[in-house]
Amino acid sequence: MSYKDAKKKYAKIGIDTEKVLKDLGKIAISLHCWQGDDVGGFETTGGASGGIQTTGNYPGKARTPEELQKDLAFALSLIPGKHRVNLHACYGIHTGKVTDRDKLSVENFKPWVAWAKKVGVKLDFNPTFFSHPKAADGLTLSNPDPKIRAFWVKHGIQCLKIAEYFGKELKSPCSINYWMPDGYKDEPSDRLGPRQRMADSLDKIFKYKYNKKHCIPLLESKLFGIGVESYTVASHEFVMGYAMKAKILGLLDMGHFHISENVADKISSFLMTFGKVAFHISRPVRWDSDHVIRQNDDLRAAAQEIVKMGPENFIIALDYFDASINRVAAWVLGMRNMQKELLKAMLVPWKTLKAMQDAQEFTAQLVLQEEYKNYPVEAVWEEFCRRNKVVADESWLKAIQRYEKDVLSKRA
């Protein structure tokens, strides 16, 4: 079906596809840099730690800031719309001796800002509370050792300053997400103490008077990680309570809950509580395994909630790392899948269906919910891609394969 015919068909159910195309183009999703090098960063040659495990050894991963930036720019060229790039503190760029995390500054990230201006993207940020000697025992902001806690508090403050710099330089508020992997492998004897220490450390970090115009702090929870299976300090309940008290935003990660939980169902409660929802798009398989997101029921349900409650009320970022496939393809596929599910949700007359629910017309609601799934979404997607000058079908894979042959295969 042509876009012209699809436009007419959607108009009959009250959907203006021209408005949908315009609104979809406004949704900027933050693309996570760590997919490009298996959460490695530019500090050491060691791999990720702190409950994180990247599986696979597909050839061609980025080894330097220049390679990572090149891969990111190429991926973005195959994705319709204007988006953001999400950095971790371990991706600071160092000249000579590596700057330790408690002393990181804007100097380590000026090259990233210059790159962002050149490519035309905005930046988001994350402190890195893992893959470091002072996090080797699995505890950072909740560590019983006050010197280690002080180190990580300084890191958290320095990262706030860097996030402010991003927001100011790029004229767009920088979201800075705090996720700490702190926890225990086996049953702890004291559950309260670590959380009290973490809360105190966070208090010290957010005592820094950051510029709210340039910087948006987020706090992320998790159920468990490898090596911290029995107890996570920053649990969902801890994050909810602390974020409300500190007047910052809690963050939902689709991979950080029990595999049977419907994370999409939590979104409306978060919106009611915080007024805005920070959301990481991921795909767990049996555990928080960070697979590339697919157009599955979980992603569809999340996209529908985002659309129904207004994308302007959300901070959306991708978060997965798969080293078993081409890493650039993983970026492109995940981002396009997210956009497709948002588009599908935007092409549903939710006001009509809501009215049926309120009127308890459940038969009609169910029938139409199902029938609308077969409306010509693809024609609208093709038009969106055409207007953004990228291919709409799977032929983007050919560009990836050429890039792999010409660029990635030459990396040792």
Image: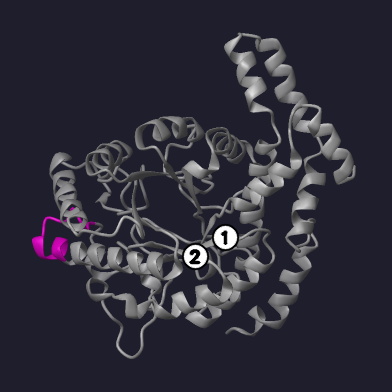
Checking the image for residue 257, the label placed there is: none
Side of 268 where 189 appears, left or right? left
Applied colour scheme: one colour
Residue at (55% x, 77% y) in the render: 118
Checking the image for residue 83, the label placed there is: 1
Query: Residue 70 in the image: x percent, y percent?
Result: 59, 78
* Residue farthest top in this picture: 360
Q: Amino acid at mark 2?
A: Lys
Q: Amino acid at mark 1?
A: His
Query: Residue 401 in the image: x percent, y percent?
Result: 74, 71
The residue that label 2 is drawn on is: 122
Q: From what the image shows, is residue 388 above or below residue 259?
A: below
Residue at (26% x, 57% y) in the render: 138
Task: Report the number of numbered marks.
Answer: 2
Q: Is residue 148 magenta?
A: yes
Residue at (40% x, 79% y) in the render: 110
Q: Is residue 196 visible?
A: yes
Q: Closest to the observer: 46 or 85?
A: 85
Query: Residue 172 in the image: x percent, y percent?
Result: 45, 61
Residue at (11% x, 55% y) in the render: 144
* Residue farthest left in this picture: 146
Q: From what the image shows, is residue 253 above or below residue 84?
A: above
Q: Earlier in the sequence, mark 1 or mark 2?
A: 1
Side of 124 where 4 appears, left or right? right
Dot 2 falls on a residue whose secondary structure is strand
Dot 1 falls on a residue whose secondary structure is loop
Q: Is residue 140 magenta?
A: yes
Q: CA distance from mark 1 to mark 2?
A: 7 Å
Q: Closest to the observer: 355 or 124?
A: 355
Magenta residues (range): 139-150
Q: Closest to the observer: 212 or 186?
A: 212
Mark 1 is surrounded, within 10 Å at the Cα level, by few (under 14), some (14 to 19) or many (20 or more) other residues, namely many
